[in-house]
Image: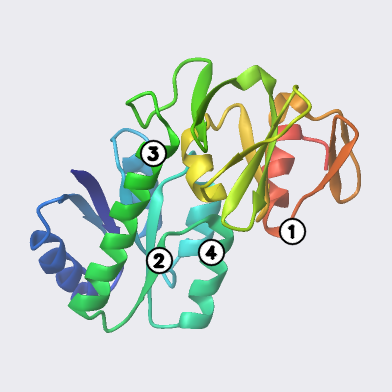
Amino acid sequence: MLKCIIVEDEKLAQDVLKNYIGYIPSLKLLNCFNNASSAFSYIHSNDVDLIFLDINMPQLSGIDFLKTLPKQYQIIITTAYPEHALEGYEYSVCDYLLKPIRYERFLKAINKVLELNKRLDKLITNGDTKNTEDHIFIKEDHVVHKIFFNDLLYVEAFGNYIKIYTRETKPILARATLAEMELQLPPDLFLRVHKSYIVGINQVNKIETNDLVIAAKKIPFGATYRQEIRKKFRSL
C-alpha cells in the first residue's frame, strides 16, 4: 500500500483528490496540507511514499518544495497550468494532473506509479526495493550484478536504458529510467546533477564551471540542479 499526502491550497481540489484516493485500495491517505511548509515538516517525521503536489501555492511554490525535498519521493503534480507542470519533470515527477481533475486521468496516473513500483522490483533483484547498507543488485539481461556504492562512479540515461559506470571498465546496461535508479540510491552518497546523470558524490575529482569531473569524464550539471550541487560541495 502506498502512503500518500496531499499538498494543495484549493479546498475543492483537496476534496476531489480525497474522494479519488478513497476509491483505490492500494492508496492510504495520511494527511492533507494547505501549504508546502507544513508538508515539509510532516515528511521529515513520517514515512511517505507518494505526494500529490500543487504548483501554485503561497509562500513556497510546488517547484520550490521539490527543490527542498530531502530524498526522492514519488510525485504527482496537480495544476491548472500545464506549462508550469513541465518544469516538474526536471525533478523526476511521475505524472501531472490538470485541473479540473477527471477520475479516469487520476487512475491513469496511479497506474503509472504502480507500474513504476513493479519495475523497481525487477530492477532490484534481492527481494527488497530498498537498498542495502553498502550495495545494490542490478539485473542486466540474465545476469545479476552486485554493485557496491563505493565502486559506483555515475549513472547515465541511455534511451530506455541506463548505463551504470563502476570502477570496472565495462558499464552495466539495465532497462530502467534514471528516476527509478535515483529512488534506490542513498541521497547522502549520490546526487542527480542533470536530467541525464546521477553521480557518486565521493567520486567527484574536480568541479569546473559547468561540469563535474569523475575519472577523467566530464559530466555536465543542469542549471536547475546547481543549488543542490552547491549545498553538497559548497564551492560553486
Quarter occupied by residue 76: bottom left
Tell how many labels: 4
Question: Judging from the image, what secondary structure is the residue with disc 4 in?
Answer: helix
Q: Is residue 108 left or right of residue 189?
A: left
**For residue 89, which numbered disc appears in the image?**
4
Disc 3 or disc 1, which is closer to the eye?
Answer: 3
The colour scheme is rainbow
- For the point 43% across and 73% down, which residue is it? 56
Q: Residues within 10 Å of mark 4 (few under 14, many from 20)?
A: some
Disc 2 or disc 1, which is closer to the eye?
Answer: 2
**For residue 144, which numbered disc appears in the image?**
none
Percent of width and height locating residue 156:
68, 46
Please state which amino acid type lies under the numbered disc 1.
Answer: Ala
Q: Is residue 84 left or right of residue 78?
A: right
- The residue carrying mark 3 is 122
Please state which amino acid type lies under the numbered disc 3.
Answer: Lys
Question: Judging from the image, what secondary structure is the residue with disc 3 in?
Answer: helix
Nearer the observer, 143 or 50: 143
Instruction: Tell me the distance, in whole angstroms, between the alpha carbons under discs 2 and 1.
Output: 22 Å
Percent of width and height locating residue 207:
87, 38
Q: Earlier in the sequence, mark 3 or mark 4?
A: 4
- The residue carrying mark 1 is 223
Question: Judging from the image, what secondary structure is the residue with disc 1 in?
Answer: helix
Question: Judging from the image, what secondary structure is the residue with disc 2 in?
Answer: strand
Q: Earlier in the sequence, mark 4 or mark 2?
A: 4
Instruction: Tell me the distance, in whole angstroms, between the alpha carbons under discs 3 and 2.
Output: 21 Å
User: Does the residue at mark 3 contact the one at mark 2 (Cβ under 8 Å)?
Assistant: no
Q: Is residue 181 above or below residue 222?
A: above
Please state which amino acid type lies under the numbered disc 4.
Answer: Tyr
Percent of width and height locating residue 231:
69, 38
**For residue 95, which numbered disc appears in the image?**
2
User: Does the residue at mark 2 contact the one at mark 1 (Cβ under 8 Å)?
Assistant: no
